[in-house]
Amino acid sequence: RVVQELRVARLVQEQFLPAELPEIPGWRIRALYRAAREVGGDFYSFTELDGTEIGIAIGDVTDKGAPAALIMATTQALLRTEAPRSDSPSNVLESVNEVLVADIPERMFATCLFMALDPSTGRIRFANAGHLLPYLTNDGRTSELRATGMPLGLLPRSRYEPAEASVPRGSRLLLHSDGLAEAHNRAGAMFGLPRIAQTAQDCPLGDDLIEALLTELDAFTGPGWDQEDDITLVTLERL
């Protein structure tokens, strides 16, 4: 029964991931979803907004198995519904949170980063519901894009700090879930956020950062590593 539940949950999760990545002139977009043995609640998505902006989301639902997959699917559906009719990423997360608070099972929640990208200018407007901070690499330096907010589904009437940033030409944005940062090697050491930031900084623009991170992970964990959690990575490079 458990095996069948995991199989169904995995199918639900995979059906809600993008079948293909958007092709945007002047941009190179890459994404990876690497499943662990058990189903987690990782997700990412791309949504057309008002014709000039693209909505980009990445998130992670607590827990495993069918409950996490169903909450992930619900969160994805809510984001796709709210994003095109809202005027800001903060309002998108606030609307999604109000629905989830009423319906989500106890002790479950979802972290989520949602941003609106204007590809022609590189401007991004974003809000963060407790998700890992994205990294922007520009001019040889990597920095975090900060915005605060509670995870989705925890507290009613939560507010999400609006933030803005720019992705200049020749720079790269990395969105990631905690499956990579919280990977452990045989000695019990954790891969960690500083290692991710350093790899992002050391990887030359034009090279595949996702491949560089996976190579670093393989070297860190060694052969025969048992993946503990789903790993999701999205990179957006402005050419």
Image (cartoon, grey):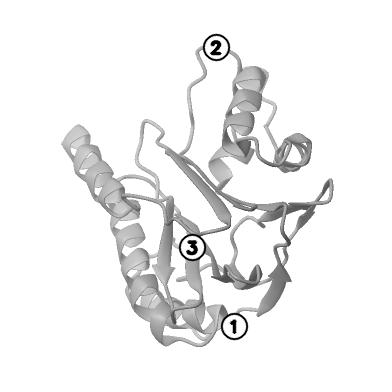
Q: Residue furthest top?
A: 223
Q: Quadrant of the N terminus?
A: top left
- Residue density around tag 1, few if under 14, some if 14–19, many if 20 or more, within 10 Å: some
Left or right of 188, for residue 31: left
Placement of 91 over or under 8, stated as above or below: below
Q: Are marks 1 and 3 in contact (CB under 8 Å)?
A: no
Measured from the top left, where is residue 163 in percent x and y? Answer: 69, 76
The three-letter amino acid code for the residue at tag 3 is: Ala
Placement of 208 over or under 144, stated as above or below: above
Residue marked by disc 3: 57
Residue 118 position by quadrant: bottom right
Measured from the top left, where is residue 83 in percent x and y? Answer: 42, 78
Measure the C-alpha gap from mark 2 to mark 1. Answer: 44 Å
Residue beneath the point at 60% across and 73% down: 127
Measured from the top left, where is residue 194 in percent x and y? Answer: 77, 41
Among the two numbered marks 2 and 3 on one chain, the one whose residue lies closer to the N terminus: 3
Numbered mark located on residue 223 in the image? 2
Left or right of 18, for residue 127: right
Residue beneath the point at 31% across and 69% down: 77
Residue marked by disc 1: 159
Measure the C-alpha gap from mark 1 to mark 3. Answer: 18 Å
- Residue density around tag 2, few if under 14, some if 14–19, many if 20 or more, within 10 Å: few
Q: Are marks 2 and 1 in contact (CB under 8 Å)?
A: no
Q: Nearer the viewer, mark 1 or mark 3?
A: 3
